[in-house]
Amino acid sequence: MAEKILMKGNEAIAFSAIRNGVDGYFGYPITPQSEVMETLMKEKPWETTGMVVLQAESELSSINMVYGGASCGKKVMTSSSSPGISLMCEGISYIAGAELPCVIVDVMRGGPGLGTIQPSQSDYFQTVKGGGHGDYHSIVIAPASAQDMYDFVDWGFELAFKYRTPVIVLADGIIGQLMEKVELHPMKPRRTAEEILRDAPWATTGKTPGRDRNVITSLSLDANTQEEFNRKLLAKYKAIEANEVKYAEYLTDDAEYVFVAFGCSSRICEAAVDILREEGIKAGLIRPITLYPFPEKEISRLAGQAKSMMSIELSLGQMVEDVRLAANGQCPVGFYGRQGGNIYTPEEIVEEFKKFNKLS
Amino acid sequence: MENLDIKRPENIVYRKPALLTDNIMHYCPGCSHGTVHKLIAEVIEEMGIQDQTVGISPVGCSVFAYNYIDIDWQEAAHGRAPALATATKRLCPEKYVFTYQGDGDLASIGTAEIIHACSRGENIVVIFINNGIYGMTGGQMAPTTLLGMKTSTTPYGRDPKLNGFPLKITEMLAALDGTAYITRQSVHTAAAARKAKNAIRKGFEYSAKNIGLSFIEIVSTCNSGWKLSPVEANKWMEEHMFAKYPVGDIKDVLK
């Protein structure tokens, strides 16, 4: 039987990194995700798997350490929370521009500015729509449990290496801090030098006779070369959109009303759906698991069958814009959100749902 | 005239290092970058470590260093090269890792990265080109610009009240426990270039001893930015730059 251990979402990230053959973690302390690095330092994986763990002097530095490590074809990652991710956005743009794989965990807190240290989902725009400069996307995956935190590290690296692109695990303070049972999968060893040469022939592993020097760069001064590169990225993003959309549905088969929510909000919405079902109202839920690529087709399909949809987010309303684009006028799309670290209850969502739909 | 038989190995007194590519350098005539590139290529070649070396190029004139030295390269964001080098060296400790950075990159936007790489004692080599000006963006004030020196953003000369003082970052870094070898050199004469090459070689050798960071500043000319001929620029550097940035070893933990 697989081992199950009670742990925080943040701790699950750390254990998953060690157990999934991650080569390096580079981070900087910030609430509410500091347990990630604390757990790694306590576990001392450099003595077991050989994983490097380093506390950088800033998030600017930690993301650029990730840039350097990823350039070597290594499995490298960082984690931070909203203000720290803002600082990393330059580096994420370079990593996207240099087509490097890496995983970045964002345990969101309320903003703007220094904001709060409580949970929030208000960095949807920042992570899903870009964040850094230039035409690029990061793949964004949204965990809703400590188990997801554990599983998404490995899945994140799989996507990152498949497409040579940064992957953001977009969690929030609730998912980072809640304690749940986590099933630990069998250990994966770190890749050997030979495997890195095979899987990442582009990496800066040292120029050997018989191959050209490998240069990791995001620079091209020539307009045509840059445009050609931008279109190459576009082709990559089209492939990601075609192949990697992931979502979960709850009681949508006959749903007349559909909630759209990701992360912790999807779990609260599930309880709201249960309350409404008990009252005889056919409610359902779609949870986008990948935020980029967004489950546009599935939301469009549900918009075609539903009387209305509602996006429920811990923000002033960010994902709702993508829900409206996907629904494309097929049904009204409402929004309810809380901010500042406040969290809605299922009953509160039910009440707002009834107001929006003029029920009772 | 068939005299090619004199081209025998025993007759060769100079040749371009094999690791210097045939790409036409974009540097201005008289610029120090080309000479420093050549010295680095020679050192890597002579040490036989081409397949074990990773270079990190900066943002600035030498952003394209990767076009000229035939090794694997990473091109960093402005100022962040020491962070890339840190991860590369820690993840690949058997490699020789060096950064190549200008004064704007290292001593202005990248101060945090260089100070903390030095403070952590990363076993890397840093080549620091100090010509007191931003070359690539067109001759603006650098942190190392001398007082009174005219640049496009100090058109009346650098005024300490307005622009602050020149930053002697190399002396600052020598005060940090994590640095093993700190030196300041130049490449404006053949003799100076030979000394600079020895310093670069020592830096690479020290980086393999795991005793901390080696830092080689090269006081350099930017004749285009300084608006002087190459010969005048060398003279101006000797008279003015060397007064503020004296050449010689500053720290050597093995001495």
Image (cartoon, rainbow, N blue to C red):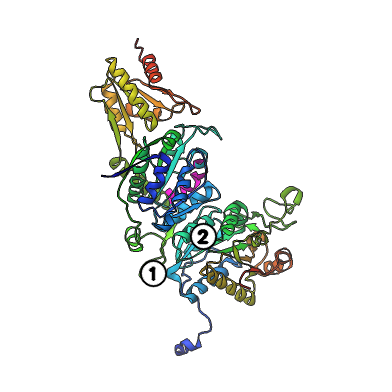
Q: Name the magenta segment's main secondary structure.
A: helix
In the displayed structure image, the side of residue A71 where residue A151 appears, left or right = left
Q: Which residue is drawn at 44% across and 32% down?
A: A121
Start-end of magenta stretch: A85-97
Q: Check disc 2 and report its element: helix, strand or loop.
A: strand
Corner quadrant of residue B125: bottom right
Which residue has dot 1 on it? A208
Query: Which amino acid type is marked by label 1?
Result: Thr
Q: Give the amino acid type for the residue marked by disc 2 in the picture.
A: Ser
| Direction from residue A13 to residue B102 in the image, left or right | right
Q: In this view, does B221 lie above or below A340?
A: below
Give the image quarter of residue B185.
bottom right
Judged left or right of residue A211, residue B77 is right
Front in this rendered view, residue A62 or A328: A62
Query: Magenta span has A164?
Result: no
At x 35% / y 20%, what residue is drawn? A332
Q: Which of B217 and A185 is in front in this view?
A: A185
Does the image show residue B72? yes
Q: Which chain carries label 1?
A: A
